[in-house]
Amino acid sequence: MATDITVPALGESVSEATVARWLKKAGDAVAADEPLVELETDKVTVEVNAPAAGALSEIVADEGAEVAVGALLGRIKEGASGAEAKPAKAEAQKESEAEPKPEPEPKKDEQPEAKPEPKPEPESAPAPTEGRTANLDHPLSPAVRKLVEERSLDPSKIPASGKDGRLTKEDVLAFLEQAKPTAKGPAAPATPAASREPSRSDDPREERVPMSRLRRRIAERLKEAQNTAAMLTTFNEVDMTGILDVRARHKDAFEKKHGVRLGFMSFFIKAAVVALREFPAVNAEIDGTDVVYKNYYDIGVAVGGPQGLVVPVVRECDTKSFAQIEADIAAYGKKARDGALKMEEMTGGTFTISNGGVYGSLMSTPILNPPQSAILGMHKTQQRPMVMPDGSIQARPMMYLALSYDHRIIDGKEAVSSLVRMKECLEDPQRILLDM
């Protein structure tokens, strides 16, 4: 009995994914719930587990294929061992190997006549496959359908080598390669694009790599924020002496008691909560013609992962302790590095904090994380000469802060005042405890 492997539900507003990597080969034995394939969405990487034990008998969606929710990825032959399962490609190869076997038998009687026969066969290689037209009773895979639609091809005219007459991505690519020298007329409009690609890829100093789905989505969202929001940025600077002093005095006892390091981010999240309570528009978002005010504080923390920037969300920051916030951030950081973040861990934030200072950034203007209306940018702490209230000049550890905001719902006064409130809480951390 064969069991289908399909694309699971990928999360809210996510309907497509890319097959990133198959963890098993066709013919391999698999156990129930064993990871089989990784799907890359525009937010996270999702593992699809085996729905049953047996052997992976067929891979329908190859690596790089675009698949929709519910699409067929492959099949498992239940109860079969790895040796019993025969992938479709292997069966096709064995069939093609089996076809020439009867041919050598007459070659024994007529050896001179048999020699010229194999020579014309490679030259007219399309001839045997032309008889195997695609069986259109089977739906085309997403990768094949995309190729066919982009090139305006008739799938019924393409020789098919897949199981039961299925058309594979390799069949379409082979058909296009064969058509290049002969199809002079249709090739004319494609020559501008075709001529550009080889000219760039031929340069040994360049490497052409397709953008990942996550990177494409990041680009789309950032551009969407610039196109839709009336985005402005206000700047300030904070004297980090108070926080550095608290950390120096209490970091060892804090880690010993809570089992997690006392970092900077928990101070900034708590200071942001104080400011967001006082200026609710900074914690709001636009929905059509309405403004939605959030009476909760789920703060997104931008984390750089191997595939790009991701923003996991620390929930209910107003009710969590410093230790709980630091533990959440540490766990999210590890998941981001391992590519194990889940969709629900990256949705629903009300405000975002980005720390470019870990990479050495001294000043930047962060871009909004839609549909949120504000984002705080942290930067590098650097000793700078400052004039103190008594007129003396001292070297102080200073950090520039940048608050980007959507001017459609946040006035300049609210944006500047909220950033000043964060600055006050950071320079005097006791204000956070006193909610001042």
Image: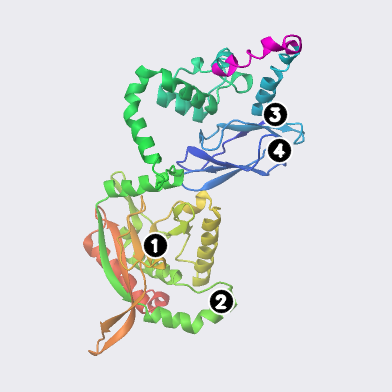
Which of disc 4 and disc 1 is earlier in sequence? 4
Q: Is label 2 or label 3 in front?
A: 3
Q: Is label 3 or label 1 in front?
A: 3
- Looking at the image, which residue sits at the far front? 112
Residue denoted by label 3 = 2
Query: As shown in the figure, which amino acid type bears the numbered disc 4?
Result: Asp
Which of disc 4 and disc 2 is earlier in sequence? 4
Residue denoted by label 2 = 255
Residue denoted by label 4 = 28
x%, y% of residue 244?
A: 42, 80
Residue denoted by label 1 = 353
Q: Quadrant of residue 55?
A: top right
**Mark 2–mark 4 distance (CA, rounded to whole Å):** 46 Å
Q: Is label 1 or label 4 in front?
A: 4
| Residue 171 higher or lower than 360, as above or below | above
Which of disc 2 and disc 1 is earlier in sequence? 2
